[in-house]
Each structure stands twice: as structure tokens, then as C-alpha cells.
Amino acid sequence: MRQCADTANRITLNVQNALDHAYELMQRGSLGEAEAACRTVLAGAGGRNAPAWTILGMVLREQARFPESEAAYRRALKIAPRDMFAHHNLGALLSQLDRAEEALAALDRAQSLGLGARELHINRGRTLMQLYRPDEAEKAYAKAVSLEPRDPVAQSSLAQLRYMRGDLKYARDIAAAAKVHRGDVGLQLAWADLQRRSGDLIGAEELLRSLARSMSPNPQTRAALASVLLEMGRLSEARIEASAALRGAPEDPAMIENLVSIELTMEHPDAAMPLIRAQRLRRPFEQRWIAYEATAARLLQDPLYRRLYDYERLVRIYELEPPPGWRSIAELNASLSEALRKRHHFQSHPLDQSLRNGSQTARSLAAEREPAIQALLSAFAIPIADYVAFLGTDPNHPVSACNRGSATIKGCWSVELRRNGFHISHVHPQGWISSAYYIAVPLDVHDTQTKPGWIKFGEPGLPIPGLRAEHFVQPRPGRLVLFPSYMWHGTNRILGDETRLTVAFDAVPLPGGK
């Protein structure tokens, strides 16, 4: 009997070692090897090992194989219904997928089983935000911060929520923690990034220079300083810092992008283009790099620019038809206004988004059950199909080269701009086709001279002298505008007191096509 017990213990230890190895592989980014290690354990256990399913779920999530990840977590819970880690990881995944109601149930179950880690509270905070329960979300983020004040995700999440709620002391916790933990680089960088995004460029520069003086400058610190100097218009200094950061991390796309942004702003397209072209080869359908290539081509007066930014062909306008069950678009828009304004109760914009002086919904509208919202999404199907068919399949053009004949909405949100509200010029890195649908617009959009609230195309999200917007579309209730996600777009500032209410989405090629 003793020999049997020793054998069983060795088997258990070997399985645990294999799972620890799988987790380490995942942490190093060796996802294929990590998956294989998990599946080997599962094969040996006849599929009856809950921790192996949980780790496999994590690996699959890292690969963006979300349905398989969810199935793995549910297999773990079928074997071990009280596994608090599986409940937590399932909840985190469901929150990422905007399935907030299900996510909160899973996270609360993990908490009831005894899980109290800060990750639980961060995920609960994000989920409660998606459910428009900001008081509870703030308490959840604050709990995570109290458990680990040095956690940059918890601190940034709490500060941003407070900023959106109009709390003038929104950064009090992260500022206090950064003062105490001066040697924590991750926390200091998070605090500097928050300062930059909220407009305190002087504070961000002082913090980053202090950080560089107190320890050997690392690429991340120098890149962050370069971003701040770029926004301050101190381009030569920014270029020095960005170049040094890239030398320290020559394969990091973020470092490359930082330097490219500065070279383009300094009107050095010849210096920027080789870096851009290398990234275009590695990531041919990454929308951000297509935008940078177009910008460099514009500065070089290369005909490629007009091919990529063919506004007359690629920016298309649709006047939406009422979906079944609705007598008119005006009736649908009235119901949409009522439903969406209940979801626009934040006083300020998210710090990581393009809008200014307005608010944005907290999760994808595709997850909402409101009939008017679902009706609108269904009404988008015909224009999307028409646009996809119109694009064709030219393999030499980035927007048509990945056309598989159909598209699906990947994310959908609503923005309400208030007085002096606007969007800074930006692109949508995760999209293929992007959009703007107008539900309600202020009266001043009829001013065809100053074009307040109009969507504009072609002005880069970089302060490059002389590169202004080239194409405008007037907002009109019931109007849908479709365009490539790589195309720089923003809006002119609203001048009056009336708000501008829109819905936007990104669509991506449907795997497998028709």
C-alpha cells in the first residue's frame, strides 16, 4: 500500500510540474508549447484535470481563441464546480467579450468561494462599469488599489473612472502611491501616462526626467518622455529620446511607432518610410501602419497616397432604411436617443479615447438587449454588404486585399458630444471598415462654412504642418458613413449647446467569407 501511495504522489507531482511548466511557457509567450503541454496532461488524465483545463483556457484566451477558452473554463467547472480560479478566469473572459451580466455572476461566485485577489476586484470593476454601476465599480477598483497600491492597472482604472465622473482629485491614489514607491518603474510610467493623457504635460515631463535621473534610463521611460515632448512641440528633443528608446528595444513596434510619429511630424518622410515599410511587411493589414504609410506618401507627393485616400470612392454615404417593426428612421432614432442617453451619464470622456468634451458607452452595443439598439444593428447589415461588394478583391490594395465577401461587426459604441465637443483625428487599429451613424445632431451642422460637428478625413493625428483635412461629410439623422479603418478621421468642434449623438462600429472580414 505504501508503494502505491508513493507512486500516486510521484504521478501527482509530475502532473503539477507539467502544469507549472505550461504556465511558465504561457508567461514567456510560447503559447503553442503551453497548449501542447496542457493537452498532454489532459490526455494522461482522460480529460479529468480541472487545473489543466483552466490553464488551457488562459492559453487559448491569449491566442484570442475565445470560444475555445470559454469551453475550457466550463470543462474545468464541470469537473470542479467550486474551483474559484476557473470561475474568476471565466468571468474575466466574459467581461472581455462584453457579456457583463454573465461575467459578474462568475466573478461574484469566485468571490463567494474565497477568492480575494486584486485581479478579481479589477475585473469586477470593469464589469460593473459595463453595467453602468459606477459607484460599485469605483469601490471595486479602490479595493484592488488597497490590496496592491503599486498595481498600475488598478491605479489607472480607478483614476480614469474618477476622471470620467468629474472628480477633480481623480489621481489622488496613484499620485500618493507613486510618491511612496519611487523605484517602481511600472507605477511611475502609469502615473506619467495618466498625466499626459489628462493634459498635464509639464508634470509628466518632470516625473519622467526624475525617473531617468534616479536609475539607468530604460527604453520605456525614454519612449514615454518622447511622447510627452512630441505633444509639447519639442521635436528635436523628442527625436533624441525616441531614437535612444528604439536602440534599446529595436524590435518593439511601439518604439518604432514612436520614432515614426516624430519623424513624420518633423516632415522627414524619407527617414520614416523605411521603418513603416518594414512594419507593413510584418503586419500587412495593421490599420495604423497603413495610415502612417499614407501620411509619409502624402509628404513625399507619392501617388500611393491618393490611391489609399481616394475619398470619392472609399468614403460612402448611406441613408438608412427603417428596419422591420419601425415605421421610420425618425421613430427608431427617437427610441435610440432615449435608450442611449441612459448610458451617457459620465461627465467626461475616457482618457484613452479620441473624443473630447463628451461621453462614450462602456461596452459594445452588440451586447445590449434593448430592441431599438438591436434593430439598428440589423439595419446596418445591408449597407455593410453593399460596401464590401463595392470594395472588390484587388490584392494590391490593403482595404480590398483581405475582402472575403462578407464582414461582421466587431465592436459597436455610442458617443455623445457636448458643447465644444470633438474627436481628435485617429484611426481604428483593430478594424477593417469603420463608421459613423447619426442619431441626433445640433442645428449648427447646417453651417457649411465652419462645418461644426462634421466628420473630416485626411488630417493626421499628428501635428504635421500643412496637412489639413481634405474631405468632409455633413451629419444628418439617419445617415451612415462607411470608410476604411486606416483612414485618418476626426470631427470639427461643436459650437452650440445642443448635443451630437452617434453610434459607430468597426467591421472585420468574416472568417471563411460567404
Image: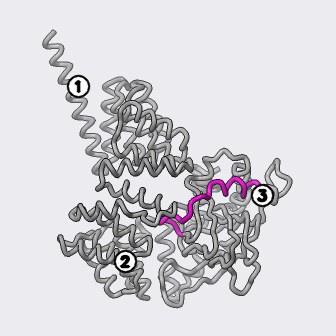
Query: Circle 2 sits in a helix, a strand or a loop, which is it?
Result: helix
Name the residue rendered at 68%, 64% in the picture. Answer: 501
Q: CA distance from mark 2 to mark 1?
A: 52 Å
Name the residue rendered at 79%, 52% in the picture. Answer: 323
User: In x, y percent, where is residue 255?
Assistant: 34, 71
Query: Circle 3 sits in a helix, a strand or a loop, which is it?
Result: helix
Q: Which residue corresponds to mark 2? A: 228
Q: How many marks?
A: 3
Of residues 52 and 363, the one nearer the viewer is: 363
User: In x, y percent, where is residue 399?
Assistant: 58, 67
Of residues 449 and 313, the one nearer the viewer is: 449
- Whether the magenta-drawn stretch holds residue 342 is answered as yes
User: In x, y percent, where is residue 179?
Assistant: 26, 65
The label on residue 194 is none
Q: Which residues are magenta?
A: 333-354
Q: Which residue corresponds to mark 3? A: 334
The color scheme shown is: one colour
- The amino acid marked with disc number 3 is Ala
Query: Circle 1 sits in a helix, a strand or a loop, which is it?
Result: helix
Tell me where residue 101 sits by quadrant.
top right
* 56 over 418 or under it: above or below: above
Q: Judge left or right: residue 513 versus residue 339.
A: left
